[in-house]
Amino acid sequence: MVHSEGRKINVFLPIQERRRGRRFFAHRGYKFDSIGESQSLSAEEIEELDRVSMVSLKTLKIPDNVRNKLHNLAKQFIKKKDLEKLGRFMAKKLTSRNCVELPRVLPSKLLCELKEEKNRIEKMLDKKSYKCLKQFLLNYENKSKEVEQVALTYAEDTRHKVSISFFPEVSIAYTLHNFNGNYGIIYRILHEIKVRIGDFTPSVLLSYSSVPAAGVIAAQEIFTYKFDKIVTVEPSEHLTSISKYLMDHISNVQYQMHLYEQGHTFDLIILSHTLLSLYDYNSRNLFVKNVWNKLSKKGIIVIIENGTPTGFRMLHSIREMFITELKFDRFHIVAPCPHESICPLSLTGKDWCHFSQRTLRLSHHIYCKGSRAKNVEEEKYSYLVIRKCEGPRTKYKSESEAVTVKEKSFFWPRVVMPTIKAGKHVLIDVCSYPYNFERLVVTKSSSLLSNIRTKSGTILKGYGYKKARKILWGDLWRFTKRISRPDARLYTPEVTKRHLYRLYQKQKRRENVKSIVDKKSEQFYSSRAIQYYGSSGVTEYYFFGLPCSPPPFPIPFCESFDLLSLQQGAVCRSSPSPPPTKAVNRIMNKNKEEKIARKVDADAAHSYHS
């Protein structure tokens, strides 16, 4: 009999045994803990959970009709070599602006100081007589963080300014170089929106993208129905003509040079790689606010930037602008953050929130972007998806209160780094609710969900471990958490660094390897001319300046008899060979012992005669 409460009980099992030709039944007792109901999920529930949590895509491919149009565009207007040179030149120019900034601790408006860090002036301000002065300083402190963000933005923007004149050849090269990567990024983000938000069916679209037609084509592939209206904003006339050519099969498209004041609103707004082209910090915030005012209720805005510290810094400031200036019931973050609070990655100073998406390149005979051995490019990006309504994290206090699987997904942690797959365990770095950057451990021995029942009635064991091996960078982790470190990717403490440095110095002293030949001499004597024409075929060996027979160990080569070569014990006028550390040291030690013995004998003889 098994009791349902949490105390240990005895269970006797009858076992049939044979002893001396007789059969009898023996009872063996076992102690069990309380046995609860096994967790069983149907195959449909498992499929829905996997579909909502595993939102990342492996390798994407652009539509065939768009690929053929890009091919025609490349071969009709310009030579292939000139096109590739222009594309590489613009890529280097943009990289010099996007990839020069190093990760750092970003100034945050949400970061509160601890009470223990109050100085004497703050303690003095707690008195009633300084109440007005305290209020003034508090207002100033709230603005000081924004001043730090403005100063940091201005310092980085003035370092490398990018200005590209999109004449026809440059427009074609820019489109061919960047279309596939941008299309894959936007397709992956819109795919997650469609999977996790089932009631979102946009009818009016605004695309403000640096690459022509990439956002509209990706949205048309995800939402297969016909949009009522599509507005694309292209800053260049030549880029607009390329967009018209690539989107001639899509109807209801309106092309504009700028974003004008219009009465109607949009259900979906895509801003792809546009913040970097704006002037400064204030212009970016003002631009995002104007676009947000054009968004309809329950609409979604998608902001995409490069997956570099520069792109992450811009998205971080915009994210904090939403959190500090809007109420929580007016908006919620759909992706990638599982919370509306301070970003834990911005406080590390060494990491930044970014993801990657693989996309098939164009054929090399159309446009060769890089190595011909690779036909897949991996584009890094940072993004932010915000919806204009109250979110599940505001409606419900925890995941258990959420009704549907899609609402529960807003509480699941996000995988923000590539997983580390080791032997029989997986390490996963996640950003989790309410604002934690953690490292999770999933082992093979302790499965997270031990009993999963499928359609055929079989039970899957180690289900969480199997999913952990398949999870991709950017997916959601829906299983229970086993935290390995409270802050993921814990950096090496100073004590450990000093200990490792001591071990390194000890190992270096133990090896005691010194270079005998300088770099110039080594390059000269290992050159092709010396190997073929500098050797006379006769090798002469010397030991402490005297000719001798070849030794049984390799001898180092040195150009002249210097002090270092004499200390090593030998020199050879031949081709260079590895330095004889052990053999030469043996000879040197033997010589030292003989010298010491001779000196001791001489001292003894001198003392005897005296």
Image (cartoon, rainbow, N blue to C red):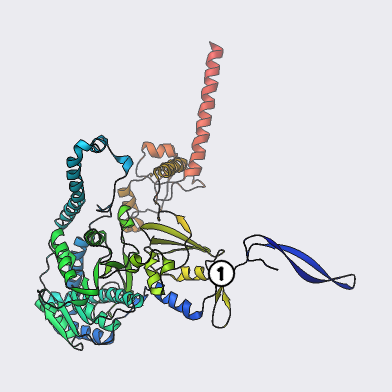
Q: Residue at x 22, y 71 (%)?
A: 272
Residue 477: name its quadrant: bottom left
Q: Residue at x 20, y 71 (%)?
A: 271
Compared with residue 600, is residue 222 higher up or lower down, i.e. above or below?
below
Residue 122 picture location, percent across and down = 25, 38
Residue 11: name its quadrant: bottom right
Secondary structure under the numbered disc 1 in the rendered image: loop
Say which of 575 and 425 sits in front.
425
> Which residue corresponds to mark 1?
450
Visible in this render: residue 381?
A: no
Residue 202 picture location, percent across and down = 25, 80
Amino acid type for the residue under numbered disc 1: Ser
Visible in this render: residue 97?
A: yes
Q: Residue furthest front?
A: 128
Query: Badge 1: few (under 14), some or many (20 or more) residues near its Cα, within 10 Å?
Result: some
Compared with residue 441, is residue 167 higher up or lower down, i.e. above or below?
below
Residue 188 picture location, percent across and down = 32, 75
**Left or right of 35, for residue 382:** left
**Left or right of 116, for residue 443:** right
Residue 405 picture location, percent across and down = 41, 74
Compared with residue 492, is residue 283 higher up or lower down, i.e. above or below?
below
Say which of 185 and 119 sits in front.
119
Q: Quadrant of the N terminus?
A: bottom right
